Amino acid sequence: MINNVHLSVLIEQQAAKYGEKVALRYRDYEKNAWQTVSWTDFSAQVLRVSRALLSCSVERQERVAIFSQNKPECLYAAFGCYGINAVTTPFYPTSSGAQVSYMMNDAEVRILFVGEQQQYDTAMDVVSLCKSLERIVIFDRSVKLKDGDSISVYFDEFLQMGETDVYDAEMKKRKDDAKFEDMADILYTSGTTGDSKGVILTYKMYRAAFKGNDSNLPVDEKDVVLNFLPLTHVFERGWAYLCLTEGAELALNLRPADVLTSLQEVRPTCMASVPRFWEKVYQGVQEKIASASPVQRKIMENALETGVRYWTDYASKQIPAPTTLRLKYKLYDKTVYKVLRKTLGLDRGNFFPTAGAAVSSEVEKFVHAVGIYMMVGYGLTESTATVSNDNKDKPNTLGSIGRPIPELEVRIGPNDEILLRGDTITPGYYRKETSTKAAIDSEGWFHTGDAGYFKNGELYMKERIKDLYKTSNGKYIAPQLIESKLTIDRFIVQCVVIADKRKFVSALIVPEYKLLEDFAREHKINYSNREDLCRNPEINKMIRERIETLQQDLASYEKVKHFILLSDPFTMENGELTNTLKVKRNVVCKRYAEDIDNLYAEAERKYANK
């Protein structure tokens, strides 16, 4: 049963209930082993952080920043802040110096927690630009301090600053005075279209989100949850906090690249993720099928076809499957699917929330086909994550983004825009009154900027309204829909569709370079470098054929007619990706403007000569 108390007292109440039960688990890279933290120890660390913050004279509702990858200390610091009614402001661990200085100054941060060397170095590079910063607290003891650094202390030294009960009376008073209307967090958006905005999350929003998700997300104290996405991301943050209210065990994955190893070692029952994770799993299986012997390939293909039919036609609709199909599915479930789930570390799976981008229908069918319950959902930072999600006890239609959670009003407004109202919705953007008024109308409806519709109680996404392209022929194109179709291919890693004010749709494609190299070797294609490889006519012909197969169900005007294979991937370092790995279209289009113009000019010449 959910513990629906104020976050300032959540951990101590759970410690009183669960005691020495494991609350957290994390990998110690020096010992190369997973370490555990009991609820009792978790609560003790939170108390020490609260005292140390009070020793630094942190005021009610003062902003404290956390700049780190997923670590137990992130949770100690966050709940330590809640314990004295301070506001946490988490930064993505990959944030640039410019982003950090902007957020620090916008939130007027005095105390900054940092994780490892990268975050410390980034913070120190811009410390002179952060006018309010007084103290940096470093989680990792191995971080090397810069010469002349007089404001940094290590986490253990920071905790010692509060090793006294002299602050307990003030802490009790703040907890007693805590209101659900108070700010809990300020989460800065990724900023795909300009400066990021600080989304205010209140304790009231969290409470409503916990209540609304309690029935939809059946997590409980028996679950082991792998935290893979950054805790800065509202999806992971809200999900992790919900799991803590239910008494579940959190296993924190420190480095994203280690997630497959962590899955195999932890064997979680739940994990929140974005569609790209499942696309990678799908591509890996497709690659394995392609390289298998004819007999093995036939077995695996038949197993997947059986699973897809079983889920799509019957299980998703919660109607009984024919006896022959049901028995065949059970046979594969005990053999092919079971081996796959165990190989991935998903053999104890309960359910796996997935959101953050469009989910390809092929990927969704595949995941369900092999007996993994992917729970597709939709949400925003401004809605404390979940707006809607699939339900285990109700029919789930392929392509839907689930059913709205209780506690939230959802309606379709002008231009089919999804509008939201309720206690999970932000009161606004920190210190940005104009942006707040633009997003929340006079009746309290938050305008998402996403177009959608309802059918049989389920919500469907059409497109991102602001991302719609209009071709010179007057046709509207939803680039994300096309991109999601193409990126499920194992040869395609990243894709940006170009169509606005153009005669036809084109795309910039970042291929899987290793697979291109393998293809070149098998077909005796000579090349001198990656650029040469991407320009090769035979390779482009192969990619074109794969693209044509992937977009068969699109209208003619929606199909990618021409594309460019890029020799360099999109990166955060080049400013092409946000911290949540979303493409900044305007940056990409500007960088490749000459290549794009040349592509269309060449196409015009070819058409003119026909």
Image (cartoon, grey):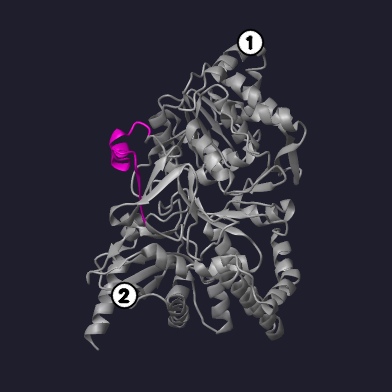
Q: Position of residue 178 (x, y in %)?
A: 52, 22
Quadrant for the N terminus, please.
top right
Q: Which quadrant of the figure contains the C terminus?
A: bottom left
* Highlighted range, magenta: 430-451
Res 557 label? 2
Residue plotted at (57% across, 13% down): 170
Q: Earlier in the sequence, mark 2 or mark 1?
A: 1
**Position of residue 524 in the picture relative to residue 329 (left or right):** left
Residue 585, horizontal then vertical, whole percent: 36, 57
The residue lying toward the viewer, choosing from 387 and 458, is 458
| Residue drawn at 58 percent across, 17 percent down | 171
Q: Amino acid at mark 2?
A: Tyr
Q: Is residue 217 magenta?
A: no
What residue is disc 1 on?
Answer: 166
Query: Residue 431 magenta-drawn?
Result: yes
Hey, what amino acid is under mark 1? Val
Q: Nearer the viewer, residue 297 or 207?
A: 207
Q: Quick one: SS at disc 2?
A: helix
338 lies above or below 533: above
How far is disc 2 from disc 1 in space, using C-alphas? 70 Å
